Structures are given as structure tokens and as C-alpha cells.
Image (cartoon, rainbow, N blue to C red):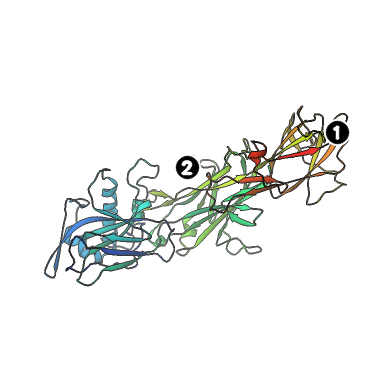
């Protein structure tokens, strides 16, 4: 049946081509290349697979297609003959897409040791070495039944093209122009040192951290009568969400510009309870009434803030991970069944907070730690002898953590332990800190000036990978590895 409402939520084919190679080339050397052109909308690592549907034989100028032992199957569903699928289907996009979905289901049901002839793309080029009639699928969306979380969810989005190889005696390659139908999601955190949205950030405990979610609108939205578009976000326990900070825009947020801002409860809704996915902490659902008015390729930006004040907060050391947030997009992938959903791959960002280790020592014997020293800490670009307001901490006996709420009852005095050690947790490398000695050890004089503490985190020259990459940290421009100084972080010694 042909109707404008029967398109499936799959990759729409902008141009369907038939490919072939010269018949005077031996079967052993025959090959044909298919280039999948996508206007740079797909990720560089996107892979495609061509599965053989029918064998192809030639009798003069005529071609015939028959199921073979290395083909997908011999039974393709009621109403689909070989002649129909290789002929009339090409003229009827509804029929072609419906057939693509059937094939996707058959492929998902194949055992792991199946003998179906298949070829995988490399840099979006598929090289075919056996003549035949092929169905091309997007690999990550097809998801063979392997027990994974999203196995089978995206099969309606996986089908790309039906293609015959060969067609005449001269062609050796062909191009299929694709449109990106599957929506995408990307997540970034504001990295304050670089003033940029990145995969990694670092903050002081108590900081309000900015996050951004970037999602696209698929280009076959017009074939749906309803559509679920739900952004899920899972915060690390270290963060507390500021629900009122959530804002949604079509296009990036710009200062003093609100024309592209969506309206809460009219264009989108926010939920923090009764969530459709128990793995997330909040979800933003953009309503179909708004989505249906957007253009293919439009990008939706969701912004929110969260405070780094939860429990537990992961503090940097060489064996620890960052405080990590994860997001994914859930979306309708079948225009006939709104509740049939697919999910984008989860995207993660990391947020680090750092540690400083100080040791109070004798000026004549720097191996001798001194107990009894007390310090206060303030943050400032330059030393301020008149400073009277100091940071608040929780802790005791030489180990202290920045208090996110800085209440009046919190301590602003840090005391070294019996060996002269002082550990301060929850610092940011974008901030310059100063230590003021307020009480000297018995028998020693106080330091005459405040001591500068400036942490520097380096994430290397390679692409940052959340959950994998770990920074190296130095203090006061000392580039010696912190591991060489103290196993759990940077070390500074002050002589009395």
C-alpha cells in the first residue's frame, strides 16, 4: 500500500542507483565499489554493511535474481516476490522501505556462524567481490542480536539501500547519496580555563558547573503523526542539579537573544521523578507540537547547571576517576508505532577537582616535619596582606576538604598533623590560592608572607576520552611529576 504516512523511520535514500562491472572480467578478479555520500553529516567512524539478498545471473542482456545458499533468506514475507523486490520495489519507496525493515529483522535473527555473504565499509566505501543483489545497512543502528542493551531497537533506522551489481557492461562504481535520519546527541562541559565547551572540565568543590546537550532533528519527521524525543541525563552523585537552570534552544544560546528559546511546558517538559528510564536523574522531552515545526538538521541545545557538592565527590589522584555525567537521546524509530524507541550511544563528560599536599618542615632539616602549625586559605590573583575573609573547610588532623556551602560553623583554620603534613582537597586549577600561617610550631617563627598555591592540570595533546584519560598535575609551576613527590598528589614544602 502506498501512502505518505507509511514511511519508516530509517535512512531515506536521496538517490537509488544500480551498480555493475564489466562482464568480460573474470569472477576471481571482479569487484565493484559503492561510495556512500552523506554531506559530512555522519561521524567519521560510521560503518555500513552490504548483505547479499539474491544471487545474480545473466543471460545475454537479461538479469535474473534467485535466493542462494549465501543469501539472507528464501522467505521475505507475504506479498514480496523476487521480481517485485528487484523491480517494482525500486519504483515504490514505501514498499522498498518496508522490505528493508523485513530484511533487518531477518539479519538480526541470523546465528553468529551464518554464511550470508557480507561486506563492511571502510571510510564509507564498500567493495563488492561477488555479483548479486545487495541490501545495505547502517552497522551501529542494525545491531545484531548480541544481548546488548539496544539490540534490535534501531532496526527501522538501519536500512540504507537496495542495490544490484552489476547492471551493464561498463560501470565499475556507484554513489548512493544518503540523508541522516537518525537523531544524534553530544554532551559537553564548560572548561573554565579554556572558556570553551569540552569533554572535560575541572572545578573547586562548591562551584556551579555548566553543561550543554546538543541534539539533532532527523530529516524524516514529516512522516510521523506523533514522536517521542526524550533527552536523558545521569549526573554523578557528586553533583546537585539546579532544575530551574534548564533551558532549551533551537540553535546555540546567545547573550540577549531569546527568539530561539523554547517555552517550558509548551515546547518541552522537564521531569525529575516518574522517569521513563530509571538510569537517569532527569529528562527533557521536546514535544511533537514543536518538533514538527522544525527543519531537518536543526540542532536543539539544552543547557543546565549543577553544583559540585554531592557525596561522594571524587578527588583527583592517579588511581581515581573523574566525576562523570552521562547523557543519551531516546527517540521514536517507527512512524506506525510511537512507542517503538531507539537510543543514541551514551555520551560522557568528566569533571575533576584536585588536591594539594603541604608539609611544614624545619629550615635546617627539611626532612623534619613540624607539628602545631596553623594556616588559613584565601583565593586571589595576588597576595593580599589585608585579606580577612578565608575559605571554609571540613576535616581535622591535617586533612581538610573545601566546604561547598561555607557555613559560619565551618572551620577556616587548618592544622597540620603531628608530622607536619597538610592535605587540602577540592581545589581548582583555574584558581590561585594563598596560605597564611597564623600559628607557628612551638619554637619557630611564623612565615613573614603568604604562600602561593597554584595547581596546573594538563590533559595531554591527544583527544580527551572521558573515563580513560587522566590529567597530570603540577603545583607552583613545578613540572616534576606529583607521583615523584608524593603518591597521592602534588607536594610543596615550606621551611620555617
**For the C terminus, which image quadrant?**
top right
Please state the horizontal and vertical placement of residue 86, each as a whole percent of the image.
Answer: 20, 62
Please state the horizontal and vertical placement of residue 38, each as a whole percent of the image.
Answer: 40, 64
Within 10 angstroms of label 2, few (less than 14), some, or many (20 or more) residues?
Answer: few
In the displayed structure, does residue 480 sit left or right of residue 349?
A: right
In the displayed structure, does residue 9 sit left or right of residue 197?
A: left
| Residue 284 visible to an observer of this rendering | yes
Whether residue 184 is situated above or below residue 172 in the rendered picture = above
Numbered badge on residue 277: 2
The answer to which quarter of the image holds residue 138 is bottom left
Please state the horizontal and vertical placement of residue 237, each as a whole percent of the image.
Answer: 59, 38
**For the N terminus, which image quadrant?**
bottom left
Label 1, on which residue?
Answer: 440
Within 10 angstroms of label 1, few (less than 14), some, or many (20 or more) residues?
Answer: some
Q: CA distance from mark 2 to mark 1?
A: 56 Å
Q: Secondary structure at mark 1?
A: loop
Q: Earlier in the sequence, mark 2 or mark 1?
A: 2
- Residue nearer the viewer, 297 or 92: 297
Q: Secondary structure at mark 2?
A: loop
Q: Residue furthest top?
A: 418
Q: Residue at x 20, y 70 (%)?
A: 168
Whether residue 61 is situated above or below residue 481 in the rendered picture = below
Q: Residue at x 39, y 58 (%)?
A: 224
The answer to which quarter of the image holds residue 354 is top right
In the displayed structure, does residue 193 sit left or right of residue 293?
A: right
Is the residue under label 1 in contact with that under label 2 (CB below 8 Å)?
no
Numbered badge on residue 79: none
Residue mark closest to the camera, 2 vs 1: 1
Amino acid at each position: 500500500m502506498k501512502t505518505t504516512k507509511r514511511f519508516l523511520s530509517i535512512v531515506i535514500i536521496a538517490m537509488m542507483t544500480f551498480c555493475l562491472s564489466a562482464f568480460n572480467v573474470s569472477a576471481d578478479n571482479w569487484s565493484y565499489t559503492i561510495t556512500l555520500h552523506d554531506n559530512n553529516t555522519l561521524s567519521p567512524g560510521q560503518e555500513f554493511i552490504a548483505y547479499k539478498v539474491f544471487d545474480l545471473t545473466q543471460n545475454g542482456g537479461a538479469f535474473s535474481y534467485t535466493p542462494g545458499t549465501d543469501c539472507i533468506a528464501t522467505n521475505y514475507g507475504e506479498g514480496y516476490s523476487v521480481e517485485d523486490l528487484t523491480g517494482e520495489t525500486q519504483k515504490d519507496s514505501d514498499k522498498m522501505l518496508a522490505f528493508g525493515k523485513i530484511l533487518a529483522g531477518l539479519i538480526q535473527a541470523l546465528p553468529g556462524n551464518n554464511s550470508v555473504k557480507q561486506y563492511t565499509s571502510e571510510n564509507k566505501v564498500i567493495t563488492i567481490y561477488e555479483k548479486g543483489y545487495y541490501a545495505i545497512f547502517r552497522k551501529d543502528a542494525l545491531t545484531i542480536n548480541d544481548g546488548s542493551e539496544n539490540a534490535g531497537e534501531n532496526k527501522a533506522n538501519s536500512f540504507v539501500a537496495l542495490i544490484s551489481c552489476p547492471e551493464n557492461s561498463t560501470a565499475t562504481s556507484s554513489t548512493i547519496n544518503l540523508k541522516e535520519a537518525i537523531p544524534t546527541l553530544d554532551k559537553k562541559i564548560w572548561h573554565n580555563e579554556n572558556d570553551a565547551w569540552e569533554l572535560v572540565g575541572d572545578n573547586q568543590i562548591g562551584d556551579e558547573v555548566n553543561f550543554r546537550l546538543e541534539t539533532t532533528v532527523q530529516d524524516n519527521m514529516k512522516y510521523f503523526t506523533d514522536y517521542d524525543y526524550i533527552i536523558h541525563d545521569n549526573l554523578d552523585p557528586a553533583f546537585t542539579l539546579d532544575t530551574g537552570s534548564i533551558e532549551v534552544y533551537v540553535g546555540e544560546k546567545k547573550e540577549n537573544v531569546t527568539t530561539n528559546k523554547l517555552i517550558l511546558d509548551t515546547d518541552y517538559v522537564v521531569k525529575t521523578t516518574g522517569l521513563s528510564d530509571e538510569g537517569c536523574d532527569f529528562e527533557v522531552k521536546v514535544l511533537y507540537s514543536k518538533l514538527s515545526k522544525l527543519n531537518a538538521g536543526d540542532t536543539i541545545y539544552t543547557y543546565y547547571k549543577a553544583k559540585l557538592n554531592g557525596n561522594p565527590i571524587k578527588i583527583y589522584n592517579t588511581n581515581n576517576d573523574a566525576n562523570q555525567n552521562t547523557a543519551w537521546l531516546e527517540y521514536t524509530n517507527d512512524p506506525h508505532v510511537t512507542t517503538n524507541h531507539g537510543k543514541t550511544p551514551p555520551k560522557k563528560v568528566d569533571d575533576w577537582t584536585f588536591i594539594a599536599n603541604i608539609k611544614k618542615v624545619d629550615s635546617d632539616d627539611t626532612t623534619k616535619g613540624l607539628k602545631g602549625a596553623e594556616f588559613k586559605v584565601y583565593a586571589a590573583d595576588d597576595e593580599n596582606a589585608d585579606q580577612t575573609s578565608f575559605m571554609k573547610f571540613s576535616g581535622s588532623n591535617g586533612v581538610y576538604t573545601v566546604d561547598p556551602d561555607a557555613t559560619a560553623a565551618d572551620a577556616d583554620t587548618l592544622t597540620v598533623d603531628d608530622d607536619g603534613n597538610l592535605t587540602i582537597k577540592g581545589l581548582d586549577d583555574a584558581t590561585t590560592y594563598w596560605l597564611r600561617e597564623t600559628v607557628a610550631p612551638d619554637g619557630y617563627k611564623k612565615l613573614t608572607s603568604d604562600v602561593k598555591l597554584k595547581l596546573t592540570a594538563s590533559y595531554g595533546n591527544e583527544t580527551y576520552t572521558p573515563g580513560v584519560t587522566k590529567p597530570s598535575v603540577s603545583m607552583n609551576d613545578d613540572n616534576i611529576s606529583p607521583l615523584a613527590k608524593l603518591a597521592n598528589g602534588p607536594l610543596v614544602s615550606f621551611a620555617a
